[in-house]
Image (spheres, grey):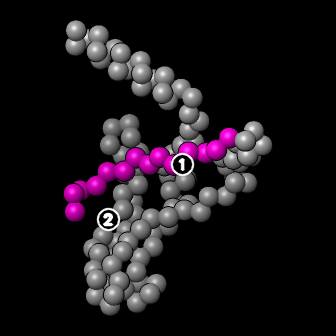
Amino acid sequence: MKKLLLLMLLAFTTMASANEEVLNFPFTPNSVKDWKYFSDQVMGGVSEGQVSLEQDGDKVFIRLSGNVRTDNNGGFIQLRTSTSLSNKPLMFNLLHNSKKEGKKLKGIRLKVKGNGE
């Protein structure tokens, strides 16, 4: 019974995601330079942090770490990238075709992991 339930769950998961178009932003040594660290220091804050490319088994990811401080009315660190459609033909086609075909894009999905703080 447990095996049947597991197989059904896997089947429904596969069916639900089969219709989704997914664009990945893989992190590689070349692509990591496109991601920038940004903090409250741009507005007089004193938070500090860094970004590094990490690997855990076959998963490659970017780690954002630092010390967020609320002195001077600051209090953030972040990681950002600018997404140019000219450099990402899959994204350009997805956006262009969805508009042309009257489809609405549903959103963006991120896989994130935190340390509980």
Q: Mark 2: which amino acid? A: Ser
Question: Which residues make up the magenta segment?
Answer: 103-117
Q: Quadrant of residue 3?
A: top left
Q: Mark 1: which amino acid? A: Gly
Give the alpha-carbon distance from disc 1 to disc 2, as whole Å. Answer: 27 Å
Q: Is residue 109 left or right of residue 77?
A: right
Number of the front mark, 1 or 2: 1
Q: Residue at x 28, y 55 (%)?
A: 114
> Which label belongs to residue 107?
1
> Which label belongs to residue 17?
none
**From what the image shows, is residue 82 above or below residue 28?**
below
> Which label belongs to residue 65?
2
Q: Residue at x 45, y 69 (%)?
A: 37
Q: Crowding near pointer 2: few (<14 within 10 Å), some, many (20+)?
A: some
| Dot 1 and dot 2 residues touching (CB under 8 Å) | no
**From what the image shows, is residue 38 above or below residue 57?**
below
Q: Position of residue 93 (x, y in %)?
A: 72, 43
* Nearer-N-terminus badge (1/2): 2
Q: Position of residue 47 (x, y in %)?
A: 33, 79
Q: Crowding near pointer 1: few (<14 within 10 Å), some, many (20+)?
A: few
Q: Is residue 17 left or right of residue 86?
A: left
Q: What is the quadrant of the N terminus in the image?
A: top left
Q: What is the quadrant of the C terminus in the image?
A: bottom left
Q: Residue at x 33, y 78 (%)?
A: 75
Q: Position of residue 56 (x, y in %)?
A: 32, 43
